[in-house]
Image (cartoon, grey):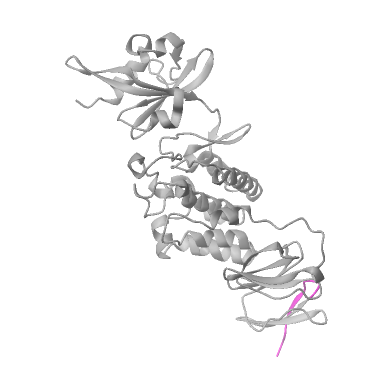
Amino acid sequence: MISSVSQYIFAVKHLNMMSRNLAAKMIYPIFDDVFPDRPKCHIGNSVIVFEVICDGKKMAMRVYMRQHPNLRAIYGDKYYPSELLINTGNDNITMADVVLCDWHEGITLQNKIEASCKSLITMANLSCMFEEFAVRLLNEKWAHGDIKPENIIFTNYGLCLIDFDATYRDGFTLGDCVEVGTRQFQHPQRDNRCFDKSIDDYPIALITTALAALSLDKSISKGIKNSDYLLIKPSLAVEGKDTMLAHIENLFAEHGDVRHYRIAKLLHSSQPALPQLKNLMEATTRPITTTAERLSLEYCNGYWGFAEDGRYVIPPLYNLAFEFSEGLALVQVGDVWHFIDVTGKIVITCGRGRGIKPFSGGTTRIVREDGEFTIYRDGRIEKINK
């Protein structure tokens, strides 16, 4: 007989009678403010998370409504098998597995995005915070398996993950894959045949792209509170049909944000694993102790960057690039031309066009749809009247 949610709630409410081992740990459920007779809980597809007090400390008690074979491997001694007695009626008893783990006080990243999406500065800070967090995740030997804003808690001490039920750990096989993550953040080809260290690649790339875009254009946040997606729909992105992703790519190109432009392009991948992601997430310009004259233009894996003594100072991310001239280098991000300095910083944005060359004598020219323009080394852009 299938147990109902109310039967699990009843068992936790009477934990001292319905548990095998946890009663001895002095665990008490925290009761709801609105429904004072009901323990506070958060109901998922296969698990109910109860807020409890254990030895004076607030914790999360995860009660499983169906079998999960990897709980001991994932949670270790926090796992209590067949712990909770569930009375399904007619004198039928079933046993539920329990995991007792830390409770992280704070709001979810999803709620933080919804509350902050109208502030470019706040979103820029949040974007940086998430990327630092994501780089640490990509350097771990395990993968979470269900990266999404609702599974990331924004706490006073930084971002932290919750819900490790879909985790991949070293030694797991395809047969250990029980869950495949939330489809709104996963590559459409992600299934139980995709279960290795790379399973977090696509959702990390998607969230990184969305947060960076929200830090540049607050108008795209419209409707974000009522959507199951974070701007981008993976199934459409892979097919090249996601108009929001196309807008975001143009946004990055126009701002000369070449690193996020490359990360956004990864969302078109036909495979869930994104082997280039880690390098892109970590790609930064080296501290500058050189001059433009010492930087050489280098080509690597289809893109251009700048190196000194064989080491990249400005990573190879540009569609096209020219040698430094008069202290600036002409580069192309997507189809947009920019001039950068030796730090990789955008100094002049020239727009889309043709015929542009590096500076000579303090000027260059570009032919755009709206006419021909002279670009000056000091940043002025003037239309040529003919």
The C terminus sits in image quarter = bottom right
* Above or below, comparing residue 301 to residue 104 in the picture: below
Q: Taken as a whole, is the magenta stretch helix, strand or loop?
A: loop
Residue 46 is covered by the magenta coloring: no
Residue 122 at what x, y percent from top left? 64, 45
Residue 106 at what x, y percent from top left? 56, 31
Left or right, 6 with respect to 351, comes to left
Examine the image and state in which quarter residue 323 appears. bottom right
> Furthest residue to the front?
171
Residue 332 at what x, y percent from top left? 63, 72
Segment tinted magenta in the rendering: 377-386
Left or right, 68 with respect to 369, comes to left
Q: Nearer the viewer, residue 298 or 254?
A: 298
Residue 222 at what x, y percent from top left? 50, 52
Q: Identify the residue at image location x=64%, y=49%.
A: 124
> Furthest residue to the left?
90
Q: Identify the residue at image location x=51%, y=49%.
A: 204
* Above or below, comparing residue 159 to residue 322 in the picture: above
Q: Identify the residue at image location x=54%, y=13%.
A: 56
Left or right, 165 with respect to 362, comes to left
